[in-house]
């Protein structure tokens, strides 16, 4: 059986994980974050205001704590 999928889309991966009985981390959509802020955060280059706001919203409003965040 051949399955056509876009490897970038989570919506393509979840049914595949279910069929294969592979555990996965639940995900939720959050607010948009500027990609430059993500790079700055990863490189330790200072403030990331929209990333910080989105992170705090996710921690406060979404359970379980092991949720993956999509933006």
Image: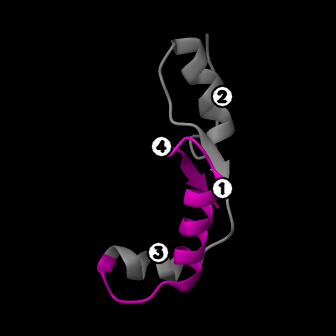
Task: Tell me the element at label 2.
Answer: loop
Labelled pair 2, 3 in contact (Cβ < 8 Å): no
Labelled pair 3, 4 in contact (Cβ < 8 Å): no
Q: Position of residue 58 (x, y in %)?
A: 60, 59
Q: Position of residue 62 (x, y in %)?
A: 63, 50
Left or right, 33 with respect to 42, comes to: right
Q: CA distance from mark 2 to mark 3?
A: 31 Å
Q: CA distance from mark 1 to mark 4?
A: 13 Å
Front tag of 3 and 1? 1
Q: Which residue is mark 3?
A: 38
**Residue 1 covered by magenta stretch:** no
Front residue of 24/13: it is: 24
Mark nearer the N terminus (3 vs 4): 3
Mark nearer the N terminus (4 vs 2): 2
Q: What span is colored magenta in the figure?
A: 43-71
Label number found at residue 32? none
Labelled pair 1, 2 in contact (Cβ < 8 Å): no
Mark 2: few/some/many CA within 10 Å (<14, 14-19, 20+): few
Q: CA distance from mark 3 to mark 4?
A: 19 Å
Task: Tell me the element at label 4.
Answer: loop
Front tag of 4 and 2? 4
**Residue 67 covered by magenta stretch:** yes
Task: Tell me the element at label 3.
Answer: helix
Mark nearer the N terminus (1 vs 2): 2
Mark nearer the N terminus (1 vs 4): 1
Q: CA distance from mark 4 to mark 2?
A: 29 Å
Q: Which residue is mark 2?
A: 4
Labelled pair 3, 1 in contact (Cβ < 8 Å): no
Label number found at residue 66? 4
Examine the rendered structure and indicate whether residue 27 appears above or below residue 47.
Answer: above
Image quarter where the N terminus lies is top right
Q: Which residue is mark 1?
A: 61
């Amino acid at each position: 059986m051949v399955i056509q999928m876009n490897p970038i889309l989570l919506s393509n991966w979840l049914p595949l994980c279910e069929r294969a009985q592979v555990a996965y981390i639940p995900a939720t959509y959050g607010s948009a974050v500027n990609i430059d802020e993500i790079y700055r955060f990863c490189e330790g280059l200072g403030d990331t205001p929209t990333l910080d706001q989105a992170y705090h919203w996710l921690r406060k409003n979404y359970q379980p704590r092991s949720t993956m965040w999509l933006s």
